[in-house]
Amino acid sequence: MVNVGHKVVTDVMRGVLGLIYSVLMVIGASSLMAQQSYIVLEKHSKKVLLASGSEYKRPVGGMVQMATAKVALDWRKVSNVSSTSMIPVPAAAVMQGGSNPLKLAAGDRLKLRDLLYACILSDDAVASRTLAYHVGSDLLRRRGQAGDPLGAFVFEMNQLAKALGMSRTKFVSPDDRMLGKSSNMASASDMARLSIKLVDDTGYRFYAKQKSRTVTVHKASGVNQSYIVTNANVMLGGAQKIIGLRMSYGGGQHAAIVSDRLPYRIKSASGTEEVTPVQLISVVLGSPSSMGSSKQLISQGWSAYERWRQAGYLAYPDRRGFIKVPR
């Protein structure tokens, strides 16, 4: 009798424990999903296909270097500076610490294009700050102003964000370094706005699609040292035809991915052809695995796009469901 009762009690306990375990698993999965923000949209139409927490402001880590590179590329174009121009590494860029895979030291020099490769392909804080100091100094000089070159550069980063309608974005540095208790903050929607701009930038697209690049550091000692910079975006190419833009190293927390597809072509009875270009942009912030999340979201995004296309590209008159980017 005691044994039977013991068995009943044991079975009940197992049932309760199983229920608790199941609840904890659900809560854990929900918590895991709550950690990330994402948005998936079609680039040309700006149609939002998937989104969750996309308006939340959160730290963007090394993804800030997308804005760093864009400001530097715009400066190069307006200033008509050659991509082979030699840029010195200031002591301040090194002293502030952070990632320094090229082992840069004060007085070293690199070509502008090599600094851009380091900034766009990798999480290189010192290379990004070197770019920022150089561009900021030149901007101050051209304007006949004195001041902090780094501050002048970060001001331009925030001006870029303002021009793109990135209302939930605040940049404080050109790399993932915190400034006091402040860090670079943005929403997934805002990073999507920046991504749209970068996809239209032929210079950025060229840099971001390279799987690796050899860069040369001209050391202050007179010795030249070459390094291979590997693209952190390990999703490049493949079945999903990834052409950019940026990913945290090791498929970490953040990613902005562009998936390409051939345009849709429809011939009319008169012989004319209607061409609809199509590209998918996926932005993930704060994911336990931005690579895994991006792969899944891109697949789901293309399915959602196909449903929208087959429904006749339905849209509300007020453009609800489309991301707004100023022209």
Image (tube, rainbow, N blue to C red):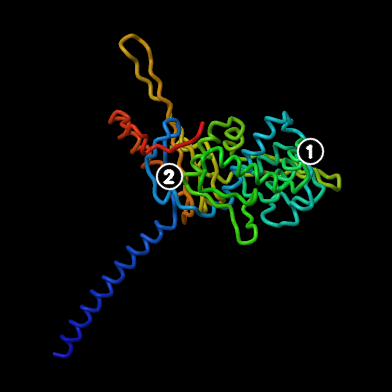
Where residue 25 sits in the image (x, y, percent)?
A: 34, 65
Numbered marks: total: 2
Looking at the rendered structure, the kind of residue marked 2 is Ile
- Judge by depth and name the residue closer to the eye, 80 or 301: 80
Name the quadrant containing residue 272.
top left
Task: Identify residue for label 2.
Answer: 39
Amino acid type, label 1: Gly
Distance, label 2 to label 1, CA atoms, is 42 Å
> 60 and 145: which one is in front?
145
Q: Quadrant of residue 36?
A: bottom left
Task: Say left or right for 13 vs 325.
Answer: left
Q: Nearer the viewer, residue 201 or 118?
A: 201
Which image quarter holds the N terminus?
Answer: bottom left
Horizontal placement of 290 versus 273: left or right? Answer: right
Q: Which residue is drawn at 41% across and 51% down?
A: 53
Q: Which of marks 2 and 1 is nearer the N terminus?
A: 2
Indicate whether 110 appears above or below 182: above
Q: How crowded is mark 2: few (under 14 residues within 10 Å), some or many (20 or more)?
A: many
In the displayed image of the protein, which residue is found farthest to the left?
1
Horizontal placement of 146 versus 36: left or right? right
Secondary element type, mark 2: strand
Residue drawn where x is 70% and y is 50% of the image: 126
Q: Quadrant of residue 120?
A: top right
**Residue 275: where, in percent of width, then height?**
40, 21
Figure check: 44 above or below 94: above
Quick one: SS at disc 1? loop
Q: Most extreme residue toward the bottom, as rendered?
A: 2
Residue 144's tag is 1
Give the x, y percent position of residue 124.
66, 49
